[in-house]
Amino acid sequence: MLYACIALFALAAVAGLTILTSWLKKKNVSRTVIYTHGLLAATALVLLAVFAWNNPESFPKYSLILFIIAALGGFYMFFRDMRGKSSPMALAGLHAFLAVAGFVFLLIFAFS
């Protein structure tokens, strides 16, 4: 299950990088990419939470916390976008930073 989380988060990161690149170039982003990013990340986060629930004595705590905070930022940006408002660039950067940090902690947990 942990390796499935890693794979799904990696795919979500590729989609997220596509979104960020398009956003920085001030181009429209495909809704398919946005929805795919969210669904992949949410699925991975649920799998990680299930892993934590099934292994309460040993799970990647910091990774889970960072991904939850990143997800909250992602939801906020998504709902702002649905209302036709853009999100601050700093929030997008913080969202990406937290997700990458969570991914690094997950990799350290899985492969150490």
Image (cartoon, grey):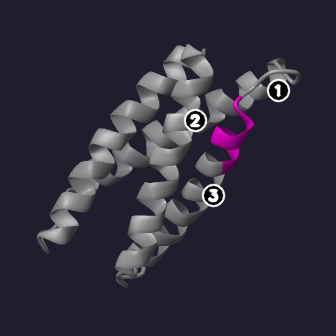
Distance Cα–Cα, label 3 vs label 2? 14 Å
Mark 1 / mark 2, whichever is N-terminal: 1
Left or right of 12? Residue 30 is left
Q: Residue furthest right?
A: 57
Position in image of residue 102 (x %, y %): 55, 43
Q: What segment carries the magenta color?
A: 60-65
Q: Residue 9 placed where, x, y %?
A: 45, 34
Q: Nearer the viewer, residue 6 or 81?
A: 6
Say which of 31 and 72 sits in front: 72
Q: Tell me if label 3 and label 1 are in contact, CB under 8 Å.
A: no
Of mark 3 and mark 2, the one earlier in the sequence is 3
| Amino acid at the residue labelled 2 | Phe
Q: Which residue is mark 3?
A: 69
Up-down relation of residue 98 to residue 5 (above or below): below
* Identity of the residue drawn at 54% across and 32% down: 44
Q: CA distance from mark 1 to mark 2?
A: 18 Å
Can residue 43 be seen from the camera position used here? no
Q: Which residue is mark 1?
A: 53
Magenta residues, dominant SS class:
helix
**Snapshot quadrant of residue 15:** top left
Disc 3 marks which amino acid?
Ile
- Label 2 Cα crowd, 10 Å radius (few <14 / some 14-19 / many 20+): some
Residue situated in front as seen by the camera: 62 or 69: 62
Question: Which residue lies under the disc numbered 2?
Answer: 105
Q: Secondary structure at mark 2?
A: helix
Q: Is residue 38 left or right of residue 70?
A: left
- Neighbour tally class for label 3: few under 14, some 14-19, many 20 plus, Cα within 10 Å: some
Task: Identify the image quadrant of the N terminus.
Answer: top right
Earlier residue among tags 3 and 1: 1
Q: Where the C terminus falls, by quadrant?
A: top right
Give the percent coordinates (x, y) of residue 47.
Answer: 63, 27
